[in-house]
Amino acid sequence: MMFLTKRYFCRFVGQTEWFRTNSRGKFNWDFLNHKDTPVEEVDMSNTIINYTGLSNLERQRHLRTLKLQGCPEVDDWFLAGLHRFQDSMEELDISHCPRITAGGLAALRNLRGLKRLNVSSLPWISTPGLVIILLEEMLPQCQITADGYDFESSEERVETGR
Amino acid sequence: MRKKAADALPGSSWMPFEINPNLPPETADIVIVGGGVVGWSIAYWLKQKERLPRGMRVLVVERDPSVSGPVHLNCFELKLHLGVMNEDPVDLQFNHSGYLFLASEEKQHWVNNLAAVWISREGGVSCYAGLENEGWFDPWSLLNAFRRKAISLGAIQCFGEVTDFKYTTHIRTTADEEQLETRRIKSVKVQMPNSMEYQPVECAIVVNAAGAYSGKLAEMLGIGRGPQDSIYGLPVPVEPRKRYVYVVHCPDGPGLDCPLLIDYSGVYFRREGLGGNYISGISPEEAEEPDTSNLEVDHQFFEDKVWPKLAQRVPAFEKLKVTSAWAGFYDYNTFDQNGIIGIHPLISNMYFATGFSGHGLQHSPAVGRAVAELILDGGFKTLNLKRMSFSRIFAQEPMLEQNIV
């Protein structure tokens, strides 16, 4: 529960309310009532969470949603570490994370239960059209969102001659 | 007239003979023979550990100016610790697609839950695959990363071939009261490529990271050329073994989650890039080892030995086209296919780091550090690799590496 002291949001199993920090960075201490309840959704967008920090979520086997939009330290190794949640994870948002490459996206193959994946605006993906097709093949049950790419670029046309 | 005289005297910049700028220096503290990934890893760690900046002259001698040797055989496994490299961000283009070993069903301790639908389960199959931190990367990037950093810290690169040694001989008495003749290298003769020019380099320590040629290098010092039953008669058991790698294009092959798959028939393949290309190969049977006098590729070998097994395991591979191929040499340890690290009892100042039989790349960061510790600290500090020393070869106790692909 260490990371809760940073600007993260989370929602517990069986609850509909989110615990968030308010505008002054203060947290509602009611979460202590749910000390042993598993966490279902975590929103860590725009934070500096990294691979080492992932160990804080080690025991959360019911984690269904993980939002990591715009996290500068989320890289390919972090994605590989997500295999811990392969039984429960249904939604993953890794858009705008500057360090992710196609090699790391391959690590998502373990998340067989994934239903929604957001890979918008990843600067290292030079052939987004091709990568999206490959992701769709790899995770057929998953709906993939990929905005913020220029699909008309010529590099695209060269690579997709499969 | 006075000007001409001034030119001819020492101290001026004019010289009647042309000095080859590519010659190595006349002296060095440590000469590393072999500019492959293991050699440069050792150079990097030596420079990293030296307590006085530029206090130690490290020279790396590589015989191939294009460094096109075993670096190209890029099929292997890597469990990489984060932040293993120097502080400059190095992009090794690591692909997290994982490693997959297939076995026949007899291997009961292996799992039987192959998720991939494009694999044929004909003949019964069980598999072993890790969940995290497994995949492949670009070996050229690693080699260059070690090399660039080592050179920036003061290591010197030289292209040439070591053709001879000058050494002194000492007679020592062993604990069993026997006389043992040991040698101490005084200088290394480095011959320039395609030339008769050479430079003897006086040195204190020599590292044998010559890969497939390590055995030959040791022979120059008499190892393996003595009487059969004596310690001098036992050669360093490393020989070049030629391996082919073929790049194929298959339009309907496995996708992004294609791991590096190693079938129990011996054939292996992995995805290369995103455009439907794959890299594959197979280790030949002992009796069919190709001739090692050249690096020509045998395309018939692919048709006869590789393709049928590829198609058997992945039906989609029945329709594929070979787009390119190359050959390289493994530094094959004929004794137990495992690396040899440490000093040879007969040569007081030659450290060996060879015999990895195709696994040199994945071991290179650790081996580099281990050898640097042996040389500078007098013993292993981080990882105890005593079991990889020559002792097991003399005691005839192999430490078999069974997963050589």
Image (cartoon, rainbow, N blue to C red):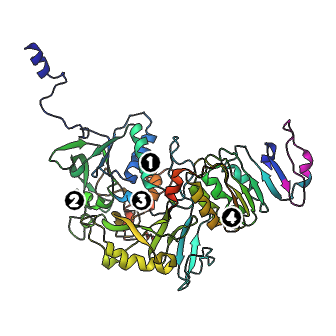
Q: Which residue is mark 2?
A: B222
Q: Write down the residue under mark 3.
A: B360
- Frontmost of labels 1 and 3 is 3
Q: Are marks 3 and 4 in contact (CB under 8 Å)?
A: no
Toward the top, the furthest residue is: B2
Q: Residues within 10 Å of mark 4 (few under 14, many from 20)?
A: many
Helix, strand or loop at mark 1 = helix
Q: CA distance from mark 4 to mark 1?
A: 42 Å
Question: What amino acid is found at the position of numbered circle 2 in the picture?
Answer: Gly
Q: Is residue A89 left or right of residue B114?
A: right
Identify the image quadrant of the C terminus of chain B: bottom left
Disc 2 vs disc 1: Cβ atoms closer than 8 Å? no
- Residue B373: image tag: 1
Q: Which residues are magenta?
A: A11-32
Chain designation of label 4: A
The reply to the same-chain question for discs 2 and 1 is yes
Quarter of the rendering occupied by the N terminus of chain B: top left
First of labels 1, 3 by sequence position: 3
Residue B104 x %, y %: 53, 82
From the viewer's perspective, is residue A20 above or below residue B2?
A: below
Given the image, on which type of amino acid does mark 1 rest? Glu
Mark-to-mark CA distance, 1 and 3: 18 Å
Q: Residue B48's quadrant in the figure?
A: top left
Name the residue tied to disc 4. Answer: A111
Secondary structure mostly taken by the magenta-highlighted segment of the chain = loop
